[in-house]
Every structure is written in structure tokens, then in C-alpha cells.
């Protein structure tokens, strides 16, 4: 389950590094990427969609963890009967 987040984080880092590299190659300068970062999600609909997609990524894993903890807490009580 954790491997999924490591892959996504490594893809995000490599794509941002590619963006900065392309800015440096074209002569814009690497500072422009960091200055423009807060404006990447400009419209409210883009922010909502990013949150929905993040929810689709995280909520099933949270549900799985909660369900596994509930099963672990109930199994010792059942075995002692």
C-alpha cells in the first residue's frame, strides 16, 4: 500500500525536476517555476477536482487500514472464547 505513494511521489518529483530543467534549458531561469507554483491550480473547479482525485487516492487506503485494525482488535477476543 505504501509503494503506491512512493511511486506517485517519485513521479511528482521527477516531473517537477523536468519542468525546472526545461526552464533552465530555454533560458527562463529555475526561479520562475517556484514563483509560479502557487498559480498552478488557478480556478476553483481545478482545486475541487484535485481534492476529489486526492480523495479517490487516499480514502480506500484509510478504509482498508481502519478495517484491518478493527479485525485485529476483534480477533483476540474471539479466540479466547
Image (cartoon, grey):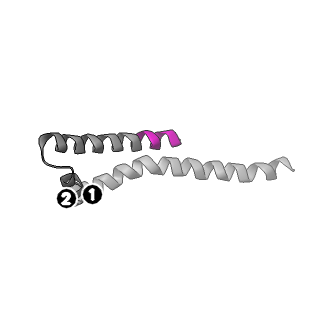
Q: Which residue is mark 2?
A: 43
The image quadrant of residue 7 is top left
Secondary element type, mark 1: helix
Tags 2 and 1 in contact by the CB under 8 Å rule? yes
Query: Which percent across, then down, holds residue 35?
Result: 21, 58
The residue shown at (12%, 41%) is 26
Q: Main secondary structure of the magenta part?
A: helix
In the rendered image, which quarter is residue 16 located in? top left
Residue displayed at 40% across by 44% down: 9
**Mark count:** 2
The local crowd at label 2, few if under 14, some if 14 to 19, many if 20 or more residues have their Cα within 10 Å, is: few
**What range of the chain is rendered magenta?**
1-8
Residue, disc 1: 47
Left or right of 11 on screen, residue 43? left
Q: Residue furthest right?
A: 81
> How far from the left and from the top, in percent, is residue 31?
21, 54
Label 2: element kind: loop
Amino acid at each position: 500500500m505504501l509503494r503506491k505513494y512512493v511511486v506517485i511521489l517519485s513521479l511528482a518529483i521527477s516531473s517537477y525536476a523536468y519542468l525546472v530543467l526545461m526552464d533552465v534549458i530555454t533560458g527562463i531561469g529555475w526561479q520562475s517555476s517556484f514563483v509560479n507554483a502557487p498559480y498552478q491550480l488557478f480556478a476553483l473547479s481545478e482545486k475541487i477536482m484535485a481534492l476529489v482525485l486526492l480523495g479517490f487516492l487516499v480514502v480506500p487506503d484509510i478504509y482498508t487500514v481502519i478495517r484491518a485494525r478493527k479485525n485485529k482488535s476483534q480477533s483476540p477476543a474471539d479466540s479466547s472464547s
